[in-house]
Amino acid sequence: MLNSADANYPGDDGFHINLERYLIEARSLRFWLAGIVAFSIIAGLLVTLLATELFRAEARLEINQVAANVTDIDTLEADSTVSELQYLNTQFELLESRFMAERVIEAGNLVRNDEFLAAFGQLGEESPTDLDLEEVLLENLTIRPITNSSLVDVGFSSSDPQLSADITNLWVEEFIAANYEKRFGTNIEARKFLEQQIEELRIRLAESEKELVDYANANGILVLETNRTDGNGTETASQSLIASDLSAINSALAQATTDRIAAEAALRAGATPTRMTQDALRTRLADAESELASLRANFGPGYPALIQKEAEVESLRKAIAEQQSSEAGDLRAAFNAAVLRENELRAQLNATKGRFLGQQDQGIQYGILKREADTNRELYEALLQRYKELEAAGAGQNNIKLIDRATPPQEPYAPSLVQNVLIALLLGLFGSAALVYLRVTLSQTLRDPQDVKRRLGLPLLGSVPEAQTTDITNEIVSRASETNEAYASIRTNLGFLTANGAPEVMMVTSSVPGEGKSVSATALATSFAQLGKKTLLIDADLRNTRMMEVLDINQRVENGLSALLSNRNLSLESASLHLDRFGFDFVPVGHPPPNPVELLAGDRLKEVIAEARGQYDQIIIDSAPMLALADGIELSKAVDGVVYVIEADRIKVRGIENAIDRLRSANAVLLGGIVTKLKEGDAAYGYGYGYGYGYGYGYGADAENKA
């Protein structure tokens, strides 16, 4: 059994949609649906006529993932490894980000742009905040990528065509600039930082070099060579003037000592100068003159080594002259000259050594100052080289290009009358469909007779139209009335329930009073009587009977069902009335008992029904309603089957299900359901004849197929 109030039911062939029910519901709501559609179309027309014309200007950009590098120098930014699609999607998101809106607001000074503020009057009279402007920009911005390309159209819409073009161009220009700053902004910042560092190092280098020079000048330190490199490419220390003098004098002293030893040896041997000695003297004179010329080119006249070299040259010249004037020569004079020269050089060496030792302490501080100056110079040159490299790398090409600038549009793109009317029509149709769907889906009552089978799990015995007259008695007995024909059809369906025809004893009940239960019991009894069967109608609604009113009986009845159930000495014949107009016998309630349930639960009820079985062909019992009462449960145990009466579109399905569940829990045989009081608006639910209200033609699947 289904509990869902839906028009979609699982049947034997699987899930299907009951389109017919939706169509029937739509028919009943046709005026409402037409009103919804008409209202939607009118609203679409009004919106179109009252809406402000909008102009959209578009610019086209080309976004490439990889840009050409005109230099061969790496930038500080790492190359991207994302896919092209991911890169493009990232750029599209950046195009419509608040970051871009902030740049456009600042670049265009939109906070004070009267044209922009006038075009978007919703910003209010007060000064708008940046957040308000950002929302307006983003709401009117459109980003439309071109499929299968790296092109994207950027558009902006407003009521002013020129403003739309200006904002669009400003947006794409700022996006291109932002992308360039992103790609090469690190280089620019690095260059600014290096400029500061280079300037600081330049000042520090100048100060350190000045301290070095001032210290050397104050202490008389002269440096001959700087930054020399040895054979292995290693830079050596600088050499001061005193150290150079000491080295030169030491070399000259060594040579003078050699000459003195040679002269002394010659003197002792008594040898005379030979031609070879003169040649040696001339060779030495040439070397000495060459050294003298070099010293004169580099130093002043007072330079000690220069003075010594001049004395040496003069001595050699004299020696050669003496040898030329006297072939024998004077070995003694040569020896004395050699001794004299050696002594002079030794004296100079000692003096220079003393000066050199005096400068040792000063050299330490000088070395510290020199190393500091050299370090500053190296740092300065390294930073300057890196600055030049970054300056060259900053010449990279932007990977985003402006293809087409935005121009003021000639015609508005919105509002579109055709589009708005179509949208309104679709919304109206959708609203109408939603109304029908909700009406069917949320319906808590039973309107379609076929729901007796689909939702309650009962066979549909038939449907009865709402009576058009207050004389229900005449409708029941008149064979030409729609009511009589409807119950005749139900009687026929009951005849198919067993091999021997309709069940002999049937109870008629409903969920609540007023659903047509008593009328249905009377009409069924009348129909069986008109068929020629001896029929008995028993009024078993011991609490609130309406049967006397339905049968139009005004006489007082002394005996009835209550008396039969409480007095075993009474016979069925003494408690029954014969109604000629209807053609059946009738057992009224009689005096209402104080304990209806106890009377119906006793064995006497079965005895009365057994007595009736022996006298009548058909017995119809009108029971009390099921909800909140146990009368029907007790009666169902004594009958062959139960006919359940349901008023159309009144009782919630949940209540009907609860009542039927109670009967099933008592093992009652449910013969089927009768739908009563079908209104004219529900006529399309039926599948009958004549008046168009539905009746079943049988029981089970065969009956449904015929229906």
Image (cartoon, helix red, strand yellow):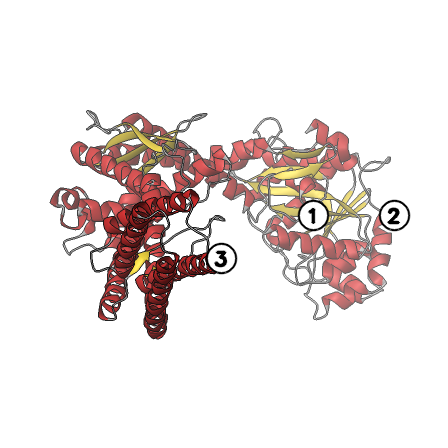
At 34% from the left edge and 55% from the top edge, which residue is drawn? 226
**Which residue is labeled 2 in the image?**
614
Q: Amino acid at mark 3?
A: Ala
Say if residue 53 shows up in the picture.
no
Q: Amino acid at mark 1?
A: Tyr
At 26% from the left edge and 37% from the top edge, which residue is drawn? 173
Residue 165 coordinates in the image, percent (x, y): 21, 33
Q: Earlier along the polypeptide chain: callout 1 or callout 2?
A: 2
Query: How many numbered markers are drawn?
Result: 3
Q: Are marks 1 and 3 in contact (CB under 8 Å)?
A: no
Q: Left of 346 or right of it: where is 444?
A: right
Q: Which mark is residue 644?
A: 1
Residue 619 coordinates in the image, percent (x, y): 78, 47
Q: CA distance from mark 1 to mark 2?
A: 26 Å
Image quadrant of residue 125? bottom left
Q: Secondary structure at mark 1?
A: strand
**Which one is in front, 660 or 400?**
400
Residue at the left extreme of this rendering: 114
Within 10 Å of the Cα at label 3, are there few (<14), some (14-19), or many (20+) other Cα atoms? few
Within 10 Å of the Cα at label 2, are there few (<14), some (14-19), or many (20+) other Cα atoms? few
**Which residue is labeled 3 in the image?**
269
**Which one is in front, 268 or 222?**
268
Q: Amino acid at mark 2?
A: Gly
Q: Secondary structure at mark 3?
A: helix
